Amino acid sequence: MSTETRTYREAVECLNTLQSNAATLEAVRAAGVRLNPNAIPEMIEYLQRIGYEPDHLNQLNVIHITGTKGKGSTSALTDSILRHVKPGWKVGLYTSPHLVAVRERIRINGKPISEEDFAKYFFEVWDRLKANDVRKDPDTTPSMPGYFRYMTLLAYHTFLRLKVDATILEVGIGGHSDSTNIVPKPVVAGVTALGLDHTSVLGKTLSDIAWQKGGIYKEGVPALTVNQPKEGMEVLTERAATLKASEFKVVSLLPGLSSIKLGLAGEHQVQNATLAVEMARIFLSAQGAIPAVTEPLPEAFVRGLENTKWPGRCQTVADPDPAHGSTTWYLDGAHTIESLDYCIQWFVHPGVGIPSASTATSERPLRVLVFNCTNGRSGTSFLGSVLAKTSAQLALYGSTETAEAFFDHAIFCNNVTYADGGFKSDLNSVGMSDADLKHLKTQKELAEAWKELVPAFPGESVHVLASIEDAVKIIRKLSPADRPASVLVTGSLHLVGGTIEVAGLSSVAL
């Protein structure tokens, strides 16, 4: 069958067969997540099977970005700067995960590639892998790469076919062993803020994390980072020296940057913007597009920062349906304790989740928390963090409200898209265990944790639901027509993406 006759839906169905199932993921977690020492050689072998050598990837002119927090936002900021400075360029952006459609992961000039192009390039890669199945070690290397590896190969292939002028590559997990880390010589590499994410429960230390992230530094390539905890900074400094980076630079806040109204909400974005500006400067200078020193910040840089869009991250969306026009959705895929702190810092703020000083007290909105997290993470610590930060924010702004009564309803729902148990094909996940799908194990644990943390919270206001569609239906019923409703959806990007899909927010959110 020719590639032209195969559809986007067929491509997504094939891609979903490459996901790891729940049993496999649980076995990996139980083993303590040991790094695959052959991860990079295997990825190179897959690349060669589709007709490329690693050196070919240097043609993509890569900006490589990793970190615990802010790597996606920094990638989006950098992408926007390049597009505003060089509007005639073709700029590729590769990120993960996606919110609603998998093709969001591969963007050209800020827009996801079309369904037609996705299917075309997808099956070109698929057919090459099927036709060239000679492996150095068939016993240990699967014939087909896993989901993320495949998507990375597809991004490389797409960008090479389209002859992009610049590529921003966001690391998937870690850095050293990540599928994106086979580009021999990026133009610049940057590490965003480090922290103990959910891997820390498996015995990871900040030094371990820094070692992984610093693995994207390359010989002869500028290595950048932001201010880090001492333990992490020491490791990054050592990694840059060991890997022979051309320079190691800790970026500092640029004068005037904090006065720019960034396209991304949240005070933490200033640090991400600082790194994005410096990486863009180095990249554009290396390409001969701008002078090495540009002071003050060029107007095109400012426009790029102001016009950056990154859906599902500290995003405010007014419901486009006139019937629900009093509902405002606050979407943030925060999935670590530190990112949840940033989320609550943004949401519990005058003019966002709490009335501004000029708003009458009687107009306090109905507030709904919609939350989910990956099985195995501690609901008590996650939700405890939400409550503690809420309390701190309320005190900061002199509010008489309490954290315990801040939300009127708490909804804990699965990431299943539809009430009939089905998924939108782009959002299908075989990594969810039967216990979660059938018995809502994680959601019940979250509800119990919430009740323990807030014993006075009305029991009828805690909802354990089987799908995102069920959650949206409940919210529609709860939201009064004569009172504004503020809905915070957080804890999982998959949850945010499903909400955008089911609530009909795509036209305004994406």
Image (cartoon, grey):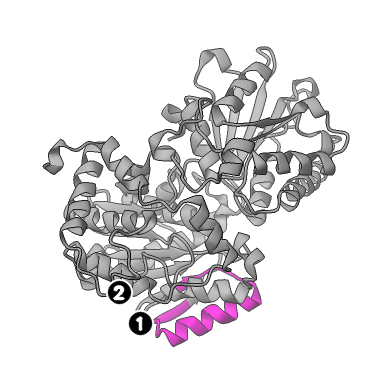
Query: Where, quadrant-wise, is the N terminus in this rendering?
Result: top left
Q: Is residue 193 magenta?
A: no
Q: Nearer the viewer, residue 147 or 506?
A: 147
Residue in view at x 72 percent, y 24 percent: 366
Numbered circles on residues, count: 2
**Comes first in the chain, label 1 or label 2:** 2
Q: Determine whether 248 is above or below 47 in the image.
A: below
State the extent of the magenta-drawn residues as a range: 223-248
Q: Is residue 237 magenta?
A: yes
Residue in view at x 37 percent, y 45 percent: 16
Q: CA distance from mark 1 to mark 2?
A: 8 Å
Q: Determine whether 471 is above or below 314 in the image.
A: above
Q: Position of residue 246 (x, y in %)?
A: 38, 82
Residues at marks 1 and 2 touching, judged by CB atoms closer than 8 Å: yes
Q: Nearer the viewer, residue 16 or 167?
A: 16
Residue under label 1, please give it.
219
Q: Position of residue 116 (x, y in %)?
A: 21, 38
Location of residue 281 by image quarter = bottom left
Q: Secondary structure at mark 1?
A: loop
Q: Position of residue 389 (x, y in %)?
A: 75, 48
Question: Callout 2: 10 Å neighbours few (<14), some, many (20+)?
Answer: many
Q: Is residue 261 left or right of residue 244?
A: right
Residue in view at x 66 percent, y 54 percent: 377
Question: Callout 1: 10 Å neighbours few (<14), some, many (20+)?
Answer: some
Three-letter amino acid code of the residue under disc 2 = Lys
Q: Nearer the viewer, residue 281 or 170?
A: 170
Residue in view at x 65 percent, y 12 percent: 481
Three-letter amino acid code of the residue under disc 1 = Glu
Residue under label 2, please give it.
185
Query: Where, quadrant-wise, is the C terminus in this rendering?
Result: top left
Q: Is residue 277 left or right of residue 53?
A: right
